[in-house]
């Protein structure tokens, strides 16, 4: 597994646990880092994903639901839901990860952690969202300005 993929994997595990059982994110992150040590820069990358996604979960979910309505959000598997949140956060909010990289990384995580159908599902949803990437970026910039 590539180094950044490993960091994304750790971030996904934290987000999944927080999503399902609402454990304190900082504690879960610390525990995962003890189990899977990362270099300082990769740990920081994972931390940015986790604490970038968590405050925006509702907005990310709304965006995914809005631009991919053929997949009822409440019926998406928790692991797939968190993979989608991470990918959308990376390309629409953070803006440092190119769209294609975010999608490819999400599909890789889906292959590793999801069901047999997860990679195709994640790719399909993100492909649909990719068509609206510019609108999503603008939407999250507006949200960011409103919070300041």
Image: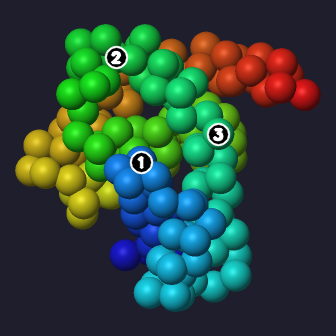
Instruction: Please name the residue that numbered disc 3 is placed on.
Output: 55
CB under 8 Å between discs 1 and 2: no
Taking the view exactly as shown, the residue that stands out farthest to the left is 116
Which residue appears at 28% of the width and 38% of the height? 122
Which quarter of the figure is the C terminus placed in? Answer: top right
* Residue 125 coordinates in the image, percent (x, y): 31, 27
* Label 1 Cα crowd, 10 Å radius (few <14 / some 14-19 / many 20+): some
Calculate the distance from the C-alpha at mark 2 to the C-alpha at mark 3.
Answer: 21 Å
Instruction: Please name the residue that numbered disc 2 is placed on.
Output: 68
The first of marks 3 and 1 along the sequence is: 1
Which residue appears at 21% of the width and 53% of the height? 114
* Label 2 Cα crowd, 10 Å radius (few <14 / some 14-19 / many 20+): some
Q: Nearer the viewer, mark 2 or mark 3?
A: 3
The first of marks 2 and 3 along the sequence is: 3
* Residue 68 coordinates in the image, percent (x, y): 34, 17
Above or below, comparing residue 40 to residue 148 in the picture: below
Residue at disc 3, secondary structure: helix
> In the drawing, what numbered circle is on residue 138?
none
> In the drawing, what numbered circle is on residue 19?
1
* Residue 103 coordinates in the image, percent (x, y): 41, 42
Q: Is residue 134 visible?
A: no
* Label 3 Cα crowd, 10 Å radius (few <14 / some 14-19 / many 20+): few
Q: Nearer the viewer, residue 113 or 56?
A: 56
Looking at the image, residue 26 sits to the left or right of residue 108; the answer is: right
Q: Nearer the viewer, residue 59 or 130?
A: 59
Q: Is residue 57 visible?
A: yes
Above or below, comparing residue 131 to residue 75 in the picture: above
* Residue 102 coordinates in the image, percent (x, y): 48, 46
């Amino acid at each position: 597994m590539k180094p950044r993929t490993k960091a994304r994997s750790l971030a996904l595990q934290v987000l999944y646990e927080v999503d399902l059982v609402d454990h304190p994110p900082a504690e879960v992150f610390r525990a995962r880092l003890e189990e899977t040590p990362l270099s300082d820069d990769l740990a920081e990358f994972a931390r940015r994903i986790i604490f970038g996604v968590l405050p925006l979960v509702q907005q990310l979910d709304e965006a995914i639901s809005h631009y991919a309505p053929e997949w009822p959000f409440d019926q998406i598997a928790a692991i797939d839901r968190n993979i989608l949140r991470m990918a959308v956060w990376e390309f629409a909010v953070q803006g440092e990860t190119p769209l294609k990289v975010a999608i490819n990384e999400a599909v890789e995580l889906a292959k590793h952690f999801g069901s047999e159908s997860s990679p195709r599902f994640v790719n399909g949803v993100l492909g649909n969202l990719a068509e609206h990437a510019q609108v999503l970026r603008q939407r999250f910039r507006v949200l960011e300005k409103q919070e300041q």
